[in-house]
Amino acid sequence: MIAKLLGSLALGFIVGVLIHSIFFSFPISYLVLIIIFLVGFFVSMMTHKVFIVLVGVGIIGIAFGLLRFTVQIDEQSSQILDVFVQEQEQIVVYGHIASEPVVHPSYTEFMLDTRELITYAELTLPVATRILVKTDIYTNYEYGQGLIVKGTLEKPEAFVTDTERIFDYESYLVKDGIYYIMNYAEAMVFDEGSASIQRGLYRIKRAFLDRIYHFIPEPESGFLAGILFGEKSALGDDWEEKFRIVGLMHIVVLSGYNVSLVIHILTKIFHFLPRSIRSLLAVLSIAGFALLVGAGPTVIRASIMAVFIVLADVIGARYNIIRALFVAGVLMVVWNPMVLYFDISFQLSFLATYGLIMLSPKVEQWFRFLPRFFTIRESATATVSAQIMVLPLILYKIGDLSIISPLVNVLVLFMVPFSMLIGFITSLCGMLAPSIATIFAFITVYALKYQLWIVDVFATLPFSHITVPPFHWVFMLLAYVFIFWWIHRIIRLSHLEI
């Protein structure tokens, strides 16, 4: 009974967060929250019928979800610079870099946590907000540095994508506490900042990337930087478009989708080892990967999702693992409720992990004709299991449908763990023993060349990629109703067979 009560409370919490997310622009007073809470309390206390009690507890959960989202908005509502947006005046602010700077071909981008506004009279006023800054590529900016930044503020606005979807850019940035953008900013390093673990991790990552670019030519180096460190910008626009056409963008961005697929295949590669040892290797790989790429919020979420793939392999009780996955998802939403509705990376990570755990046994039966060597069968199973779960969301949110994606994933995905491993060894040897690194670099380049060749060939095929016109969210919901009904049927039939 306690499990049912907690489940009802958690489900209500998610519903409350979702309601407030959808009606984001409508503030909810604390009085309304108290009323909702009291309604739920009295409903749960007025009867001993289990269903009515669960409904009452669910209403209480909705109140908590609405409250948590309201508190999050209050904490992040630092829109005190709106007057400068309206007047289009240049301002000067002082703050610290709060994210890893990302270097694009024509600009460097990072989040700036402001501390002070410097007026024209050279007075300083305390200002606490967060700005997405885009500045020059000629300065080596680092996490934690103190900067004086001059530029014109803009408010992020929704825009129409190439597939005619409306992308709510403002809400997407607000989930990270960003309320302003400053393009073409002038930035000057004022303070190098103090040492921190996060900064040290980013420096280690940069050292590995430098070795990759030194020993491996383009475009292979950009591809390796993407699959190993999530450096999507290193690919270049042309290759990025090709990866999008063939449905492989998920392997060059940091997401639970990518990490879960790789970990799933790794556990299959090491299937000959005792379960405890291969699970330990997988968990150590996840932890090492998270530390290597800086252990930011996105990486941590992706790593947590990947751990559940390992747990499913170790414990085998998939339905208990799903319960734990749901708890982890709820805790992530408690930490930052805005990821539930506004962060597609979180949504794809959760759905892909769920699909890998629940659908893999069934989907693997479809690919019995495929060989197990080079984990070809496992690659096909992982790809299809994950894509079944994420496809309705991708079609609704993005609108891209790659007809050849399953085939390309099978031809490429089995090489990704090997490329990541041998590429990492190349980079490590590049720092410790450059002469040995040359040998590993030779192997790495040809492993990457094969994958890029597959992408290049299939991206040029006619009708390999279509754009789905925008459709109502109800159709996406119906698709998921059918998928979950199918999963429920699989579970019921498996119980009957037992």
Image (cartoon, rainbow, N blue to C red):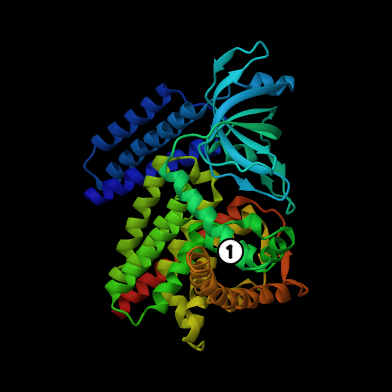
Rendered location of residue 35, percent (x, y): 37, 26
Left or right side of 484 for 174:
right
**Residue 448 appears in which quarter of the rendering?**
bottom right
Q: Is residue 308 above or below residue 445?
A: above
Q: Between 451 and 478, which is closer to the camera in this rendering?
A: 451
Q: Which residue is mark 1?
A: 212
- Which residue lies at the image location 49% right of the left edge and 38% below the top edge? 19
In the rendered image, is residue 367 in sight? no
**Residue 403 appears in which quarter of the rendering?**
bottom right
Q: Amino acid at mark 1?
A: Ile
Q: Between 464 and 52, which is closer to the camera in this rendering?
A: 464
- Which residue lies at the image location 52% right of the left edge and 37% below the top edge? 98
Left or right side of 408 for 42:
left
Rendered location of residue 241, percent (x, y): 72, 62
Rendered location of residue 481, percent (x, y): 50, 59
Q: Is residue 432 above or below residue 36?
A: below
In the rendered image, is residue 127 in sight? yes
Q: Between 91 and 267, which is closer to the camera in this rendering?
A: 91
- Which residue lies at the image location 68% right of the left edge and 66% below the top edge? 218
Q: Is residue 433 above or below residue 481?
A: below
- Which residue lies at the image location 69% right of the left edge and 49% below the top edge? 165
Q: How crowded is the residue under tag 1: few (<14 C-alpha within 10 Å), some, or many (20+)? A: many
Q: How many marks?
A: 1
Rendered location of residue 154, percent (x, y): 69, 30
Left or right side of 417 for 462:
right
Quadrant occupied by the C terminus: bottom left
Secondary structure under the numbered disc 1 in the rendered image: helix
Q: Between 96 and 49, which is closer to the camera in this rendering?
A: 96
**Residue 353 appears in which quarter of the rendering?**
bottom left
